[in-house]
Every structure is written in C-alpha cells, then in structure tokens.
Image: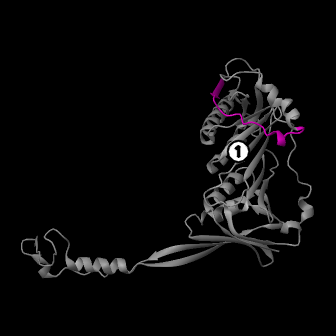
Amino acid sequence: MRFRADIRNVHTFTKLTASLATLGHIAWVRLDNKDVRYTVIPDTGTQVWSVITIDTIFDNYTIQSAAPDNTINLEVPLAVLQRALKSAQNANAASIRLTKKDNIPLLSLTITTDTIRTSQPTATAPSQDQFAGNGTSSNTNHSHPDGPPNDFREESADFFGARQDHETVVTQDVPIRVLAAAAVEGLHEPRCREPDVHIVLPNLVQLKSISDRFTKLALATKSSGSGRSAGGFATQSAAAGPKLELSANMHGCLRLALHTDSMNISSLWTGLENPELDPEQVAEGEDGLANHPSTRMKALGDSTGQHGEEGWATVRVEGRDWGRVLSVGRLGGRVIACFCNQHALILYVFLPAGEEAVGGGESVLTYYISSFAA
C-alpha cells in the first residue's frame, strides 16, 4: 500500500480541512485513482460528503493498493492535519505520503522553506579623519557632498552580499487509522426526496455574519429568560440551541428569520439565481422535469418575496451548526441550496478550479442538514 503526492495548493487544502474540522473531529478519507473523498459524519449535526479532484490540491499523485482502483481508506484527525498544514503556508514545496513508524500508520508531511542567513558586519568606531572640527562632516570620503561615505557603501555591500539562502526541511506526522473496505462499505450518502426549491446562495461571508448575529441575539434572549436552579445553573439543556428559519422560493428570494417569544426579525435577499435543472439529471427526463416540485413552485409566489408564504420552502436549522457550515465560504466558489420543505436542506459547494487545474472534473462538497420541527 503506497500513497505519495506533492501538495500543489496548500492554501486550499488548509481551508478545506479547517472548514471540515468545524463540523467533526474525524474524517473518512478515501483515496483512489480518480479523486479524493472527504466525509464527515458527526454524532449530531450536518454531514459532509465531498469529492475533490486530484489536481485541485495534489500534483505528482501516486497511489497503489490491492483494492479495486487502488483505493485506500483512512480515518484522519482533522485538527491535527490542520495544524500540520498551517506550518506549510509559506513553504516553497510540500509533499504528503503514507508511511509507518513504530508500527503506527502516519500521513507524513514534508515541508521545505527558505531560511535567509546573514553575516553581521563588525561595528567599528569612526576615525578622526572622518569628521571635520566643530562636528561638521568632512566631504573627503563622499562621492557627492550629500551622499553617504564610500566606506559605508562598501560595508553595506559586504553586509548584503553576505546574505545566504538555506533550505529548511520540516516533517509533520499525523497519526491515522487505515480502514478495511468492510469497515466503510455500509456508509452511504443520505437520501432525500426531490427538492421543492433550488437557489444560488448570496455571499457566504455576508450570510454567515447575519446568521451569527441572529444566533447571538437568540442566545442572549434565551439566557436572560431561562430559569435557574438553586445552584445557579441554567435548567435548560445547552444542546437545545437556537433555531433559525431559512426559506426560499423559485423567484430568486431567500429569507433568514428568527422567531422567539420576544422577537421576530428577518433578512430578505432578492434577485438571486434559480438554476435550471438538466433534464438528463432528472428521472423520466422532460416529463419528470415538467412534474418536478420546483416546476410547480415556479407558478407560486413572486420576485418581491412580500406577498404571503405561498411558493416558499422552509427549513429550520440549529444556529451554531449553521454558522459552522457557512465557514466553507472561506473557500469561495458557487453554492446551490436545495430546499426540501420542512424536511432537509442540501448545499452543493462547487470549488473554483483555479488556473493550474487540469482535467475536466469538478470538486464538490455536499452538506446534508436536517430540518427541525416548528
């Protein structure tokens, strides 16, 4: 079993790992001849199933195993991998390989950086003839009356000429588990019904900022109104986090709302894109598209989002979990949200290919978020 690759895009790899680490401690990583898959399945909260093209983050990719397509399954601690990648942010080169030390399987990162060393010039006191009496500088050692002394120029040349570049190689080891095929064969992506609404989300950084603000307001309201036991601790379970309501229609409208006993606030986006479905990707083709839930929703509602609830699909998400999901915005790319009314929200995050990417594949992160009851 062998795996080795150069890391061609350290920043993307680091941001991807950091985004996944907010949702779970462990990732199932599947490597094979075609792509790299990262899957995070926490005990509670959002699941992530991602397919990353090899050239998005790797170069000179080599893999070999006895399994079909040279598949290797690994269990990787995301926080440890993220720390290792951070040390490679300013590297000239970085590579990763599967190895073993003391019978412990590892992902070993080799990071090469340049270190500049200089030879400090020896400090010497100025000679008497460098100065003219009464503290006035003499021009005898100047090439120009207003220029620096020639001997200073020579010392400067010696100083900067003594700079030398040296390569520093650092190795970061990430302990992992190698998983047998039987251990992961029962893991499958969640199955959801056809979405009622699909819409391109606005800038995730902006959406996260507003979502986090709503969550903090809900937590503050809940904290001030929650009962307390005799010991002074809140009697309400901390696991019951604030719920945010996300709604969208097929006319480019998205709404984020918070409803509590003491407040009702919302933000509305209009003019967003509702991407067209490809008939080839819909069951029964053109006939299936004509009867698709999103097609029926197009006949309802309007582009202002101000005239009632008709035509809207709504889900309720836990505010803090939703904020962690939106951290994927640091990767950029296009995000399509699919709303299964009162059931689930699926996000498809399409990573930008980058100028150096080759091949026709596309890297996609898929987030599955269950809706809470009203």
Judging depth in this view, the residue of 345 and 261 nearest the camera is: 345
Local crowd at mark 1 within 10 Å, few (<14), some, or many (≥20)?
A: many
- The colour scheme is one colour
Residue 178 falls within the magenta-colored stretch: no
Is residue 263 placed above or below 83 in the rendered structure?
above
Q: Is residue 158 left or right of residue 170?
A: left
Quadrant for the C terminus, please.
Answer: top right
Q: How many marks?
A: 1
Q: Quadrant of residue 335?
A: top right
Q: Is residue 229 left or right of residue 354?
A: right
Q: x, y (%) of residue 347?
A: 74, 42
Residue at 64%, 46% in the rendered image: 329
Q: x, y (%) of residue 195?
A: 81, 35
Residue 278 falls within the magenta-colored stretch: yes
Q: Quadrant of residue 308?
A: top right
| Residue extending farthest top | 307
Judging depth in this view, the residue of 339 and 296 nearest the camera is: 296
Residue at 63%, 62% in the rendered image: 9
Which element carries disc 1, helix, strand or loop? helix
Residue at 67%, 34% in the rendered image: 273
Q: Write down the residue under mark 1.
A: 325
Q: Is residue 374 visible?
A: no
Stretch in magenta: 264-284
Q: Is residue 265 visible?
A: yes
Judging depth in this view, the residue of 275 and 218 nearest the camera is: 275
Q: Is residue 200 left or right of residue 315?
A: left
Disc 1 marks a residue whose amino acid type is: Val
Judging depth in this view, the residue of 242 and 208 nearest the camera is: 208
Q: x, y (%) of residue 179?
A: 86, 65
Is residue 171 placed above or below 260 in the rendered structure?
below
Q: x, y (%) of residue 264?
A: 67, 23
